[in-house]
Image (cartoon, rainbow, N blue to C red):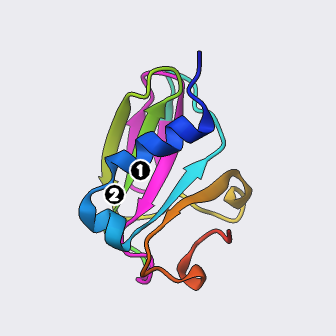
Amino acid sequence: MALSDQAIIDLLLRQLTQIERNHSAVYLSSSSLPAGTTLDLPSVSMNIPWDALLAFVDREPLANWGHSCRYILIARETGATISQDARFPPFNRNNLQSWRVIYQAPDVPDSALAIPK
């Protein structure tokens, strides 16, 4: 049985470092990624070992790109995760609607979010 949306969000938030909790914005894609595929992102490629969702942690939402960020794959069934450091975001004009903000650090203004709440 797949994890609930809230269970996935809770699991992702537990993955954050203290620095990320203090300064980042975290996004979750609603698009499911099938097992056995490869996800090609700007300067990062990730093999998907199980059906997964993708989260994106913007560690410096007030900065221009590229800067430190990371991607987190989360297994929909088990909650297993894979994390990959990166330098660029996954967003483009064609996929903004599939992302939502799941965490915003207290010092991150709404205007710094890539996706409006």
Name the secondary structure under disc 1: helix
Residue 49 left/right relative to 34: left
Residue to which mark 2 is pinned: 86
Hey, which quadrant is residue 79 in on the image?
top left
Residue 35, image x and y in percent?
A: 51, 21
Residue to which mark 1 is pinned: 13
User: Which of marks 2 and 1 precedes in the sequence?
Assistant: 1
Q: Residue at x 64, y 57 (%)?
A: 100
Count residues near mark 2 (Cα–Cα under 10 Å), then give few for <14, some for 14-19, many for 20+: many
Between circles 1 and 2, the one closer to the viewer is 1
Name the secondary structure under disc 2: strand
Tell me if I can see residue 67 in this picture. Answer: no
Q: Which mark is residue 117?
A: none
Q: Residue at x 26, y 67 (%)?
A: 19
Residue 27, image x and y in percent?
A: 54, 57
Q: Residue at x 42, y 22 (%)?
A: 49
Give the residues drawn in magenta, as a range.
39-64
Q: Amino acid at mark 1?
A: Leu
Hey, which quadrant is residue 110 in on the image?
bottom right
